[in-house]
Amino acid sequence: MNIIVTGGSGFVGKNLIPKLLSLGHKVFVIDISSESIEVYPWFKKINFFKLRIDSSEIDTVLTKINAEVLIHLAWSDLPNYENIIHFKNNLFQQIKFLTCAAESNIKKIIVSGTCLEYGLIEGCLDETMSTQPTTFYGFAKDEIRKTLDFLSAKYDFSYTWFRLFYIYGENQNPRSLYPSLINAIKNNESVFAMSPGHQLRDFIHVDNVTSYFCKAISCNKVFGVVNLSSGNPISVKEFATDIIKKHNSDITLNFGIYDIPKYEPKNFWGSTKKLISLNDF
């Protein structure tokens, strides 16, 4: 199967592409740079297009590839979720690109959304809840998801919109909690500064995330919005403590150094009822 992956040099992309190749798919990657993925053995097995998603060449490239599936991960200006550029620039670039993809006759589109579309709702979040984003990033993502509803009706394609929760694992941004703590342990640091730690979050390993992307490719059912989460609320303190235990470290966690971002609820996690149904296909 011919599959296009945008943003292949990002966190999820780096973990997803080798899985797609191992399943026998022909992978076409569209990204602004290949520098961070040229070091991987699988890079020689992909077809790489150095392009911005708003490039004037996108129409031609999409038509040339003639892919059955688009996995759209590309997004810029992260992790600054409150930057107005997500509204001023990214929103319209993304809509233009997805419109081009729809017009190129791609029949299945899988997009990475975000749990920030829910806004400040506490507790277990399920896909039937109304979205109330409080960041420009969450708002832009939510508007794109709504646009896909219109596009899918007009151009007759199916889409899966994965609302990603707190992914962690290999190739993650080094400033994120998981890699920061791992690096501190490897460097034999004595103290690790972090947030208060009592807030509940939904952490899911990137291997599980990419496995569900692969399942979404192979099933014919139309899923729409799906929480891509573990469904298991865990305090940030417990999450960090478990990492320390697994690495047999005696590093001390220094809580309360960083504030909980104002755009995050204190305690929230994703319902996995709809996600689990993917296992039946």
Image: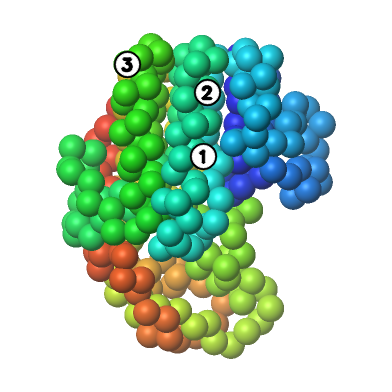
Find numbered disc 1 in the image and state the secondary structure of the residue it sits on: helix
Amino acid type at image mark 2: Cys
> Of circles 1 and 3, which is in front?
1
Question: Residues under labels 2 and 3: Cα distance?
Answer: 15 Å
Q: Residue at x 59, y 36 (%)?
A: 54
Task: Indicate the position of residue 64 as horizontal and vertical percent values.
Answer: 68, 14
> Of circles 2 and 3, which is in front?
2
Name the residue tied to disc 1.
93
Residues at discs 2 and 3 in contact (Cβ within 8 Å):
no
Taking 71 as reference, is 88 above or below it? Answer: below
Find numbered disc 2 in the image and state the secondary structure of the residue it sits on: helix
Residue 192, numbered label: none
In the image, 147: left or right of 170?
Answer: left
Residues at discs 1 and 3 in contact (Cβ within 8 Å):
no
Tell me the crowding category of disc 1: few under 14, some 14 to 19, or many 20 or more residues within 10 angstroms, Cα based: some
Amino acid type at image mark 3: Ala
Image quadrant in which you'd find residue 202: bottom left
Q: Nearer the viewer, residue 73 or 217?
A: 73
Quadrant for the C terminus, please.
top left
Examine the rendering and report whether any part of residue 47 can be seen.
yes
Question: Residues under labels 2 and 1: Cα distance?
Answer: 11 Å
Precedes in sequence: disc 2 or disc 1: 1
Task: Indicate the position of residue 125 as horizontal and vertical percent values.
Answer: 22, 48
Residue 100, numbered label: 2
Name the residue tied to disc 3.
153
In the image, 6: left or right of 111?
Answer: right
Task: Indicate the position of residue 221 as horizontal and vertical percent values.
Answer: 34, 16
Amino acid type at image mark 1: Gln
Quadrant for the N terminus, please.
top right
Find numbered disc 3 in the image and state the secondary structure of the residue it sits on: helix
Examine the rendering and report whether any part of residue 208 can be seen.
no
Taking 33 as reference, is 56 above or below it? Answer: above
